Amino acid sequence: MTYTSKSTQCVHSGTVDDTINQGINTPIFTSTAYAYLDKSQHLYPRYFNTPNQKAVIDKVCALEHAEAGLLFSSGMAANTTALLSLLQKGDHIVFPREIYGGTQYLAMHELGKFGIEFSFTKGNAVEDFAQQIRSNTRIIYLETPSNPLLTITDLAAVADLAKSKGILTAIDNTFASPINQNPIDFGIDVVMHSGTKYLGGHSDISCGVIVSSQRLISVIYQSALCFGGVLSSETCYLLERSLKTLHIRVMRQNENALFLAQSLQTHRGIAQVFYPGLESHPGHSIAQKQMKNFGGMLSFDLKGNNPEAFLHSLQLIQPVMSLGGIESTIMQPSATSHAMLSEEERLALGITDRIMRLSVGIEEATDLLTDIEQALEKG
Ligand code: PLP
């Protein structure tokens, strides 16, 4: 049976039948060696086709409206495999000006080794992407909402632009999660996730995902086989278990984030809140068009508080270097995700030391607000 609602897909899509005991969960298949005589398909972990890998990828494909996909041992393994499999020497890729630091590092320090050219846009409008297109551009890469200022790019407009020039589009959809945004519906070709974030959701597994059309996955697969960044059956099982609650977790995170964004935007200790769900956000109307909800990530600009003192004063929200877990966490991008940029580069992006990036969890929203308010009072 094919399920169309996110909540049912989360719970049921992809589950492998336990034909021995009729248990309701996918069993963990630990074998790395499978019989091959008289078989149409040869099973092997690095071939991305063991039963636990298949169960998870089928669920993610259902959630992302994708034909096919591959599971990796980290988000960066997914990003790197997608780009290096679809690009070759002499090709050019366009990146938005704000992207995850690891992807930026990949662009600036690794792609050149393979003879791949790249450029960054000056803004997030479709015209900014159009300006960077060259005769050898093969991919336009997107991240919306972006990290850390939650800027929004119009998916359909960029997909149309790219298609008109025979260019592929790829997106890191980590911040939105498949619950809030399905880029394939807007014409985007390749969707990637750091599953370490919302898909895993409990800050205890590292994984990554690529989903796309069957045709493009077949191309990516040939390189992925060689690069070898696969996920073990045990971790697949944990991920499948986590995905069963993805919808309910993310819906609660959406609600909590909207509440906090609305409450903090009028707080005297906060200069600005960056959240696409606020009407004051410049990308709000595009976000309304392409996102089902506005997500669990928000950033804010401290007015008078010392940033380090503010972080030390929090009692419930933990300053850590990741996002997307059920617990609320916070970080200062200038000291963490964007520390590799020079101060001048950071300021050009609007990332001052006073910007705080909050990953909103599933706790009681008023407890989170109380924690932020008391930390603002102390600092
Ligand atoms: N994409 C985004 C938006 C991220 O925030 C991260 C990690 O923080 C990654 C990709 C990389 O994921 P991983 O750490 O699982 O390799």
Image (cartoon, helix red, strand yellow):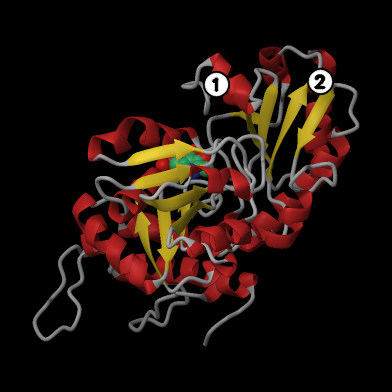
Q: Nearer the viewer, residue 210 or 248?
A: 210
190 to 268, vertically: above or below? below
- Name the residue type under label 1: Glu
Residue 345 bears which disc, if any? 1
- Name the residue type under label 2: Leu
Local secondary structure at mark 1: helix
Report, in whole angstroms, how far the alpha carbon at label 2 lies from the one at label 1: 28 Å
Write the residue at 68% across / 31% down: 317
Q: What x and y, as percent, mark residue 235?
A: 37, 54
Residue assigned mark 2: 376
- Which mark is first along the chain, 1 or 2? 1
- Mark 1 crowd level (few <14, some 14–19, many ≥20, 10 Å Cα): few
Write the residue at 26% across / 50% down: 88
Q: What x and y, as percent, mark residue 181?
A: 62, 60
Write the residue at 57% across / 73% down: 9
Instruction: Please state if 198 lies on the left or on the right of 78 as rendered.
Output: right
